[in-house]
Image: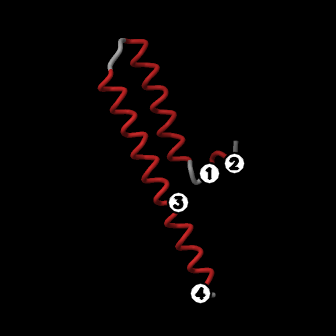
């Protein structure tokens, strides 16, 4: 559990989990395609933003280590 809480991909996992839960909720209460697509869009945006942040910080830390 500590490995997941310290993961750099935590924001992406939260977005995916919210999408899955919202999809289940919308399918149980009634098919709401715009709602499902909205949550899918937000999950994809969270994933892309998180990936850019992770790769940027990795590149930045690599450059800092090369200067030492």
Q: Give me the C-alpha separation between circle 2 and circle 4.
A: 30 Å
Label of residue 67 in the image: 4
Instruction: Give the residue number, with chain letter if any, for mark 2.
Output: 3
Q: Secondary structure at mark 2?
A: helix
Label of residue 65 in the image: none
Q: In the rendered structure, are the residues bearing label 1 and label 4 in contact, judged by CB atoms less than 8 Å apart?
A: no
Label of residue 54 in the image: 3
Q: Give me the C-alpha separation between circle 2 and circle 1.
A: 6 Å
- Residue 32 on image: x %, y %: 32, 19
Label of residue 7 in the image: 1
Tell whether 38 sits left or right of 13: left
Packing grade of label 1 (10 A; few <14, some 14-19, many >=20) is few
Is tag 1's residue or tag 4's residue first in the polypeptide sequence? 1
Looking at the image, is mark 3 or mark 2 nearer the viewer?
A: 3
Tell whether 58 sits left or right of 3: left
Packing grade of label 3 (10 A; few <14, some 14-19, many >=20) is some
Residue at 46% x, 47% y is: 47
């Amino acid at each position: 559990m500590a490995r997941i809480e310290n993961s750099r991909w935590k924001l992406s996992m939260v977005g995916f989990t919210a999408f899955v839960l919202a999809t289940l909720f919308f399918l149980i209460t009634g098919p709401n395609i715009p709602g499902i697509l909205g949550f899918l869009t937000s999950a994809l945006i969270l994933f892309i933003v998180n990936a850019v942040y992770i790769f940027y910080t990795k590149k930045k830390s690599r450059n800092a280590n090369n200067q030492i």
